[in-house]
Amino acid sequence: MKKVILSLTMFLAVVLNLSAQTADDIINKYITAIGGTEKWAKVQSIKVEGQIEIQGLAIPFTVQGIQMKGMRMDAEFQGNKIIDITTPTKGWSQNPLMGKANMEPISEEELKVKLDELDFQDDFINYKEKGSKVELLGKEEEDGTEYNKIKMVTKNGNEKFYFFDMKTDLIYKEESIVKQQGQEVKSSVKLLDYQMLDYGIKMAFKSDMGQMMMVTKKIIINPVIDESIFKGN
Amino acid sequence: MRIKKIVVGGLLVLASSVSAQTTLNTSHFQVMEARALGPSTMSGRITAVEGITADGQVNLYVGTAGGGIWKSQNGGLSFAPIFDKYCQSIGALAVEPGNSKTVYAGTGESNMRNSVSIGQGLYKTTDGGSNWQKLGLDSTERISKILIDPSDKKIIYVAAPGPLWKSSSHRGLYKSTDAGKTWDKILFVNEETGCADIAIHPTQPNIILASFWQFRRKPYSFNSGGAGSGFYKSVDGGKSWTKLSKGLPEGDLGRIVVTINPSKPSQVLAIVEAKVPGLYQSDDEGESWKKMASTDNITARPFYFSTLVYDPKDAKRVYRPAFDFAYSNDGGNTWNNSIIGGVEPHADHHALWINPNNPEMMYLGTDGGVYMSLNKGSSWHFLNNLPVGQFYHVSIDNQAPYNIYGGLQDNNSWIAPSQSPRGVTSVDWRTLVGGDGFWVQPSPLNSKIVFAEYQGGNMFRSNLLNGTAVDIKPKKQEGEEEHRWNWNTPIVPGPSTKKTVAGKSIFNLYVGAQYLFKSIDEGRNWEKISPDLTTNNKSIQQQADMSGGITGDNTSAENHCTIFTITPHPKNEQIIWVGTDDGNLQVTMNGGKTWENRSAGIWKAGVPQNAWISCIELSAIDPNRMYITLDHHMYGDNNTYIVMSKDGGKTFSRLNSSEFTGFAHVVREDIVNEKLLFLGTEMGLFISLDGGVNWMRSKYQGMPWYNLVRDLKIQAQTNDLVIATHGRGVYILDNLQPLREMIKSDINKDAIFFPIQAFKYDFTPSSPGPPSNLIGWAAGNKVLAPTFYYYLKERSNDAVKIEIYDATNKKIKDFNGTNLKGLNRVYWGLNINPPKVAKGGFIAQTSIQSSAFVTPKVPVGKYKVVLKVNGKTEEQWIEILPNPTKGYTTADISLLYNQGMRMFQLTEKLAVLVSDLDSSISVLEKNNSKDSIGNSKLEKLVNIRKEIIETNRKSVFFDEFKFRRRVADLYISVASSIEALSTSQEKGITVMEVEYLLLEKQVRALMK
């Protein structure tokens, strides 16, 4: 009899455990779903090719990056070259369509936001070691479905909110808060079309930003990249 | 083993049948987003204003009576709503000292007027409003103040006056010592008496003063004060309490407002409602009191005005915002209310935040929005950016574009267009009649005549032609009892018009006191067409004697036994249904000759007997079907009551849903598809796609989830749903047609491409537009373009492709559609695929850049639209029609298209030429050191290229016109025109074509 009660208590304990899901439970499931920490931690460089679709136009782009060293985005529209470079200490941008005909340095405030992007491994891979803090905010409805919502504050002080799909364990939506001149501006992106790469990790091939969609065509993991492309001027 | 297999198999069957049954929610038509028209120029009641400076910015949190919480990060120059998923009635806000991101929000307003809404408890955010957690206190219904202990931010006090319309044990003073996780009720008096106000000593936070108030509203009376009211003090953080009386008025007390002087904390001020009311001061932390001023502005309407604030630094300066803005420079002995310069703030004040770092700067919350002062309240500036007006009803007309008419709580009757050049903005709203606004009805026959009213049935005929208004309220006739007019008296024009013998067109206008009146001459003469249709229960009609309690208050808000809703049948005006505020449902089948009371039918369906009949909706499709909403909240019952009859109102059944919250105000059946129903309650808009069996809360139509929806109209020409809210102004959900299509379709299909509505050539007007610095809150216009709707059962990961073919089956346009789960909407700008444009040189913000997406507009005719999704193809046709009345004839559109295509072809030819030229230059550059002939050729080519492409230009402020730019300018001019070029203008195209031929010859010759 005692044994029965004991096993029953244990069963209840398991049930209780399940209901008290922690942020790390959700994050761990997510990491498993995208290929696991081991593979992701070995991502040291990346090259992405794709296009930005906006108002019926498709603007091709290439992103190249070396983990925590540098990132460069190149795009072209009607023969005009748009370039964006971020390094841990400096950043530059060039966009003739926006009145920046040549490569110009970006402000510290802009750089702070972009620093997180130098981590090409997923935000949640070894997030503790990288200095990020997370908090489970509970469940929240988005587009008629409930998602687990987790808040992350990165080492650089940027705030992000992630919506985790309870069926696929993948991230459906990411909201970020960017501070400009003491005021906060919220932006959000929906991550769609997750695909498994030959390398063995899973990534979203589409980022829906409402007015704009980023469509990835090709991803190369750990290509050889010449660091000199991260020099602004 | 076998059994297990069967079980698993069974589960699989179950699972697959569940997934096969697509259940809809409102995210499945999120593309149908309502336009919020405001207005912000006449804002709504503000109940709380709190602020804090962070990162050099004044952050403001503004709580409203029915429009949620709005945040500004720039001192009120712009606001964004941050509480749209929760109850919209806000009672109190508190910002954690030193932390701009942690805010407590108590829902349920405590300005106890007749129309006040209800709350759902206490919430907290720790990230400035992005995320909120519910902390409980759900049943308090009303929270008047939240205070955080200045020495320990985990200690929170919440004053809960509690429910207005019923007894409740949930009233009282609550305390949390763990930042809101758990709560103790630390002071409770009785079920009729709640905590109205609290104050904490700034340096000895265990000293707390709390006022308790006995109050109750009934549908026909209000009572303020009683034996339960009292003033209490604790010196041990609320563990024990002493009742204060020394120096305070004798007898029963009412509402007491209390505030402690931050510069001299032993000094306390309190406004005490009593037989002899007044402002009282204590110099010993509340132990004893002496009377100071007792002017009207200090003591009037204590149930409505409960704000008293000391200057944060000046011990003598005190503010009493009430029906006007009073301030004292001598600690409250004398008061001034002069306003010098700026604008007079709207009357009726409920909140004041003074910037502690700069006490000159303050923000005042009124019945008409937020005002800012930079000189301690002597002059004010209105913040025209909070669209939180409180409509009671909305009406529409049949003009194009149609107009919106409605009355706002405390804020007049209004008219605005549903569309306006560059969108509907603050300057589009115009006021008609003053006072509280309710029903505003345009004449069905004369677009310049509008009927409007203020509270208690004071109604007018407004003439928009000469700007005058005439009182048309029916006068008491011989043999009639004194008329009883509801605060919110219905004014309803009949749906049909007819001609008199003399040939004059007339319509019936109905208004209701206890009798129903009809006028056929715009309210000049009235005929009483019913007996008293109410219960005429005299015991609930003694407002002048009964209402107010300690301080008399009788403003027609308590008038009772009156007609509250009038609905003539849309097809047969001999049938008129009437509902009263005391539960009577009456009908005449003969234009008022005889009446029949049908109330018993709704009671049988389970509705309480005295519930107000808030709306009667007669189906325009089936003469036997009707819906009624009922409101019983004034008896303390907040349930959603909606009943339906299928037999012309003989028997009724109640419609219910687990989704419902809030007492019901309005129900509408679609005028085309009877399955489509809309229900508006105090806490949400609900939509049914199956005739009322299932309901879903509107969450994804761009409105607050718990919107206070008071009225709904469907505009017949545009199929728009117009939504009147009591806290967020008016919304328009443009074109219900796709919802009707969804109802008709099998939504279990993977993809459905709905039939496309024909499009009549038209363009959104852009002038005369509003002055850009007076826009305030603005709503975009309905998009005037061919619109394709399709439904996807699941979100598609592959791009959804749309192709358009002309009559010769030539593909003229490709573009990507959206790939949302549910309904998708794509506009076609009547354009074709853009031309190739010559590359290189300077293009930023020029016609060259625009040439990559602007194209001629297609001619009139039929076009095939092909939708490609997940390997499947669906087809529909669209007809593009001319619009001769607007000047868009088939011939002119065709001519314009041909002119545009000439420039289109020229643009593409130039692109090819430049591309060839660039290739030649590139080849020569690679070989440039090899011979001098090559170098000379290269130089010539480079030079001629400079005549085509703008290569010198580096900035938008240094213009350069080369051939490409001239082609592009003319191309854009023709392609964006809405009228064909005249014969002389068209010659410009010919000149350009000739010039091009010469240029091409020259370039090709050089390239040889």
Image (spheres, grey):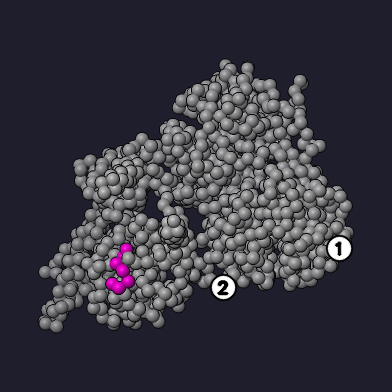
> Tag 1's secondary structure?
loop
Residue B246 placed where, x, y %? 87, 60
Could you tell whether B268 is left or right of B74 in the image? right
B409 or B250, which is in the foreground? B250
Say which chain tag 1 marks.
Answer: B
Q: Quadrant of the N terminus of chain A?
A: bottom left
The numbered mark, 2 or 1, whose residue comes first in the sequence reads 2
Residue drawn at point x = 32 percent, y = 71 percent: A37
The answer to whether any part of residue B750 appears in the image is no
Q: Is residue A37 magenta?
A: yes
The answer to whether any part of residue B833 appears in the image is yes
Q: Where is mark 2, residue-wise?
A: B55
Please report the bounds of the magenta region as a residue range: A33-39
Residue B526 placed where, x, y %? 67, 24
A93 or A207, which is in the foreground? A207
Name the amino acid type tagged 1: Ser
Q: Is residue A130 magenta?
A: no
Q: Where is mark 1, residue-wise?
A: B288
- How crowded pointer 2 is (Cα within 10 Å; few <14, some 14-19, many 20+) is rated as few
Residues under numbered marks 2 and 1 in contact, where contact means CB atoms less than 8 Å apart? no
